[in-house]
Image (cartoon, rainbow, N blue to C red):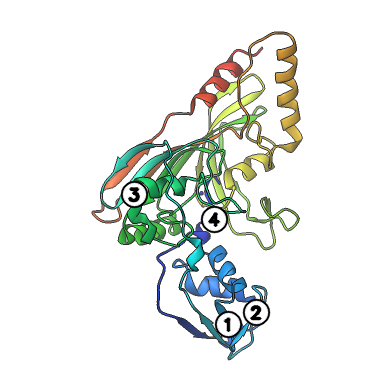
Amino acid sequence: MSEEIDADDLVGEPAHAPVRITVDAAAAGERLDRWLGNQLRPTYSRSYLVGRIEAGAVRVNGLCVRPAHTLIEGAIVEFDPTPPPDRSLQAEPLDFEVLYEDPHLAVVRKPLGIAVHPGNGRTHGTLVNGLLHRWPQIREIGAPERPGIVHRLDRDTSGLMVVALSNPARYKLVLQFKARTVKKEYHAIVVGKVALQSDYIDLPIGQDPKQFDRQRIDLVAGKPASTFYEVIERLPGYTYLRCLPLTGRTHQIRLHLGHLGHPCIADPLYGRQTIGQYYRMIAERKVEGLPVPDFHRQALHAYRLRFEHPIDGRELDFTCPLEQDMVELLEFLRGLK
């Protein structure tokens, strides 16, 4: 929640029976991928369905079509949910901390610099590969390309994640994320002096049409997004924040803070106007022989995760201290004049 991926992109349990739906009048004119995603969520993610459409597993009136195909009333949409056989993932050893584990779920600390699951041509070295090595049973839990995953963090965002170890737990965790009942707290170190001690940022978010891996504020077609923040500590030229996302849009915290004019330190997507300032300061200190932190990622950490156990209903509440690189960054900034 990204932080994480948009909660609408959470994936559910794969089915095996073919799906056959007749398009009604209300859906006429809609794109196939968007309409099918709304019909089948949370069982299948939009990205999974787009892949299956492009692979020919979705047909409209018996014909293979593109994801952007425009639907007409009365069209018959057929979907073969059988996952393609070549998408099986390999189990690989990966060193990650497990904070909690029971037969239904685990809470883990995602290693820095590790993507949560394969994608964009990457098939190895992800958290999912490591999860399969530790818990082979998750291969049958959820979508085949993201077994056990109910939410995600960006590759360079550190902190807590919950992983489903059984299908009943996974389904109920997905519903909790979609209902926004999972409470999340992030810690961020941002550029500049944030004026208010605390505030809400309520700005809708949509994908940037010019850059697929970036989101933007979209007042017309964006999805509602709200982030509460408060100051933990004021530093010379920077601010240490606690952020509580009330919704779970992709890159929500990073985008909201960047739009506020206070992006996370070293954020390559939403801090482009200030990232040079930070690295110039580091370079100048190096030239002078002064100590500098070894920090090269967005300063964002998933610090706390609180949710209801999907099987027995217990409230589970976990915290995770900052990674050492963020600790050293804070110590460095406290020493600036």
The numbered dot on residue 165 is none
> According to the image, label 2 marks what residue?
65
Quadrant of res 288: top right
Residue neighbourhood size for the residue with mark 4, other residues' Cα within 10 Å, grouped as few (<14), some (14–19), many (≥20): many
Question: Which residue is rendered at x = 64% and y = 78% of the image?
Answer: 30
Depth check, mark 4 against mark 3: the one in front is 3
Residue neighbourhood size for the residue with mark 2, other residues' Cα within 10 Å, grouped as few (<14), some (14–19), many (≥20): some
Residue extending furthest left? Answer: 312
Is residue 11 something that shows in the picture?
yes
Report helix, strand or loop for mark 1.
strand
Q: CA distance from mark 4 to mark 3?
A: 26 Å
Question: Which residue is rendered at x = 49% and y = 24% of the image?
Answer: 324
Q: Amino acid at mark 4?
A: Asp
Q: Amino acid at mark 1?
A: Arg
Q: Quadrant of the C terminus?
A: top right
- 148 vs 299, nearest the viewer: 148
Please tell me which of labels 1 and 4 falls first in the chain: 4
Depth check, mark 2 against mark 3: the one in front is 3
